[in-house]
Image: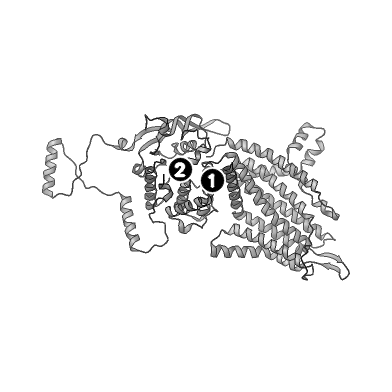
Amino acid sequence: MNNNTDNNIAVKVEGLTKTFRDFWRRPRVRAVDGVDMQIRRGEIFGLLGPNGSGKSTTIKILLGLLHPTSGSVTVLGAPPSAVNTKSNIGYLPEESYLYPYLTPRETLDFFGRLFDMKGDVRKERTRQLLDMVDLAHEADRSVGEFSKGMARRVGLAQALINNPRLVILDEPTSGLDPIGCRQVKDLILALAKQGKTVILSSHLLADVEDVCDYIAILYKGKIRACGKVSGLLEERDAMRLTLPVLEPAKTRQVLAAVREIINAEPSIDRPSKNLEQFFIEVVQQAHRETERTGDVSGTRMVAEYLKNE
Amino acid sequence: MTQKIKQYSSITCLTALETVRQPIFLLLAVTCVLFTALTPQLLMFQFGEEGKLARDSGLAYHFVFGLFIAGYAACSSLAREIKSGTASAVLSKPVGRGTFLMAKFTGIAAAIAAFSVCAMITTLLSERVVMKFYESGELQGYLSDKLIGSLLIAAPFIALLAAAGVNYWKKRPFGSAAFGFLFVTLAFVFVTAGFFDIRGQFKPFDCRVMWRIVPASLLVTLALVMLSAVAVALSTRLSTVPTMVICTAVFAAGLMSDHLFGRYAGISAVASFFYWILPNWQNFWVADALDGGGSVSVSYIIHAALYMLTWSAGILCLGVLSFRHAEIK
């Protein structure tokens, strides 16, 4: 995360502070307080923290939607107020952010137009994205009629319409079912594999742990912990040895040998799948056994144009 | 530059489409058309002023319903977009804030123009339909155009039914489809009126309506666009309710500005300032000028349009300045 030349840095934040003021311009709340961070290109960076910790405020400052009270911010080598830089940014906001009377197709077409895309490119990307988020069969229904999860999928698609170099996702899995969450996480990993930088804000720790290379944990506007996920989570005073299932006699032999070496009682358990993985296996099995009923539980591939870097 | 124009047109089209698809827009447009269409049928004891009552009512409905549409559309288009987050989704793309605001205003103005065309056609036909005294070689007596009157009342219902069908079978959004069909059905009634005389007899196309209503309707439209500029500028900082309250106050003060400030303008600097700065809506209400064969001159319309453009440009410049520094939460 550090010690890199500036052209390898996608986002650089130094001493960022944001104070919201009341009607009389008196300081009301300090949402971000002296944040410093650097995010390298091609990295998946997680912003973690409880509600009100300053994650969304930080993201909105990166996008130029909010103005910092003090500190400096550089995004893809330019200040957040530079309009042209936003051609390379894809943003999924936290809350409802779609025009309720537009259909998903119209929504993607509209956002595509903002990037000066040619009609055929827009049409093809819209088709691929709708297929990717599994909404091709709902392309002509008003977004206002969608469930939160379906609206989230449209939001994700609009964030990727411009094939961005920097993708900022604010609570991307909020409202999605476990399969949708897995899809989003696979997509994030695929995007990073294409060299795109991803900033992921979430309070769902499992999601962040699954995909992020680096994380920063915010609390009351300050960074409380920052670093590589594996490094932060590693227990340095213990090891785990994984073996195939052994007969009881051989297990006792192994335990006795280990006990003799470490001069303490080792623990033994069986590795288990996580619930998400188990859930997906059950649903995929059920999906294979029954006919498709028009739900949005399919697992789709990443849109073709997003793979072509 | 090309990209900016494309962005501008995209946001303008989207704003117009979103405005038209809002149920409140359709409700107000249909109510305005129905009230105007029903006026000739409900008039009693007119004392020979049937035509005046029909066109004054039509223009008044156009103004009043248009005011609601202008105010609500402007508020929902900006204040609610900022609140709901759609503005942040658009402004996170390479779109300048000035472009966004001005395109929003243009989109609202386009929706108001579409509503105004419907209101104007209805007023023209309503004035034609009303019972009038006719004196010619073959006819002397009172007559009303029953065929066109019936078609005019039926038009909104046909539009709603057609939109329901399109919504059911083609899954197209009801609001915009209904407004589109309303536009088409009114245009159809207008063309039909050209092929029939007031007694319902078929004749070669000759649309006999009081064309002098068109400039009066155009002036009302200019006033509506001007009010929407006020609402858009206020929406950059205020939410829907304060914006609507201030717009109502500006409308009321502007309506009475001749009485409140105009008469003291020569003797008081304060009155003069307010008289100068408040939009004077009386400039856009010329229904009385149509009485007794009067008409509105082209030069008056040009002056009124320049007044609207200058005043709107001023208030929108303030809006852009305000929006450039606004925080999109």
- Residue B300 visible in the current orientation: yes
The kind of residue tagged 1 is Asp
The kind of residue tagged 2 is Pro
The verdict on a common chain for dots 1 and 2 is: yes
Residue position for label 2:
A164
Quadrant occupied by the C terminus of chain A: top left
Q: Residues within 10 Å of mark 1 (few under 14, many from 20)?
A: some
Colouring used for the render: one colour
Residue position for label 1:
A116
The image shows residue B129 at horizontal and vertical percentages of 77, 64
Given contact means CB atoms under 8 Å apart, are the residues at marks 1 and 2 in contact? no
- Residue B238 visible in the current orientation: no
**Residue B127: quadrant of the picture:** bottom right
Element class at badge 2: loop
The residue lying at 66 percent from left, 55 percent from top is B28
The residue lying at 81 percent from left, 59 percent from top is B51
The image shows residue B103 at horizontal and vertical percentages of 61, 44
Depth order, front residue of A115/B99 = A115
Depth order, front residue of A286/A256 = A286
